[in-house]
Amino acid sequence: MKFLSVVILSLFLVACSSTEVRLYTRYLSDTDIKKISSKLDEANFTVITNTLSFPETIDQSTLLYSPFINGEKTLDILINSLSDIGWFIPNVEALVSGNHWYSKDSVGLFLLPEGVKQKDKVASQDLANDYESLHCDTVVNLLLNKDNSYQLSFANKTNDRTDHLKGSWKIRSYPYIELTSFNERWWFYFEIEQKIQSDKVSEINIIELKPVDSYSFFPNCSFVNGVRI
């Protein structure tokens, strides 16, 4: 009887388990995230959000699914649920190997609003990152936050002024980015350059911010960030 109870409980847990949807929210607004999560929750999916970078090969809304996914209609239900709230998935692929995220009953959902990510441009969401100085006589760190604020940090204090260390940033006219101090006394302009480099381990996606002028606080300094792909 005890054995039978265990079997029944196991079957119940399997029946009640829901497919995990790994929702990549990097290019989504808070409103979009809430709406999508709510809709998929209603359809009995378990939504797990993250802000990870998209693979370079993904330039449209994409669904990657595990070959071990449960239920013949699971993908149809997911795609139809998204369609109901205006999200259409033009690219659906089975991920057989090479990504441990989808080694069980789960899918990866990469949603791109129209026109957000273009192959020849770096989206503002991808610019928000931590940058290290390059070609510099001093060590400087530049942090571009997602709320469009910035912060400069110097390893060694080189100037008594501090009003240039924090402010806001925006893409003025691509490929140029503008940093403005909060007191609007200081402006810094950089050209955005994206390139691929490689080492013995893998390829690296590099974003470099090149100064348009030689600024006294960090003469001729570029700022770089690299992500392995």
Image (tube, rainbow, N blue to C red):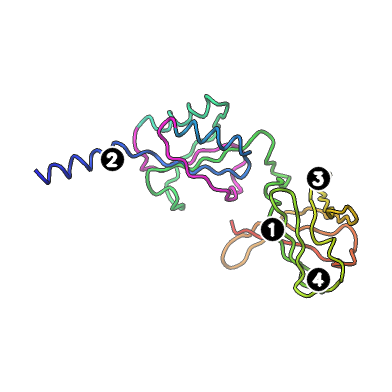
Q: What amino acid is found at the position of numbered circle 2 in the picture? A: Val
Using the image, determine if residue 49 lies above or below residue 140: above
**Which residue position holds label 2?**
14
Q: Quadrant of the N terminus?
A: top left
- The structure residue drawn at horizontal position 58% and vertical position 48%, both measured from the top left corner, is 51
Residue 102 position in % (x across, y down)? 43, 47
Q: What amino acid is found at the position of numbered circle 3 in the picture? A: Tyr
First reached walking from the N terminus: tag 3 or tag 1: 3
**Which residue position holds label 1?**
206
Q: Quadrant of the C terminus?
A: bottom right
Residue at the extreme left of the image, as rendered: 1
CB contact under 8 Å: marks 1 and 4: no
First reached walking from the N terminus: tag 3 or tag 4: 4
Residue 219 position in % (x across, y down)? 87, 68
Q: CA distance from mark 2 to mark 1?
A: 44 Å
First reached walking from the N terminus: tag 4 or tag 2: 2
**Which residue position holds label 4?**
136
Give residue 174's mark.
Answer: 3
In the picture, measured across the screen, residue 37 lies left or right of residue 67, that is right
First reached walking from the N terminus: tag 3 or tag 2: 2
- The structure residue drawn at horizontal position 17% and vertical position 42%, both measured from the top left corner, is 7
Q: Which residues are magenta?
A: 42-71
Q: CA distance from mark 3 to mark 1?
A: 17 Å
- The structure residue drawn at horizontal position 78% and vertical position 75%, both measured from the top left corner, is 156
Any magenta on residue 56? yes
The residue lying toward the viewer, choosing from 26 and 1, is 1
The residue lying toward the viewer, choosing from 63 and 185, is 185
The residue lying toward the viewer, choosing from 5 and 218, is 5
First reached walking from the N terminus: tag 1 or tag 4: 4
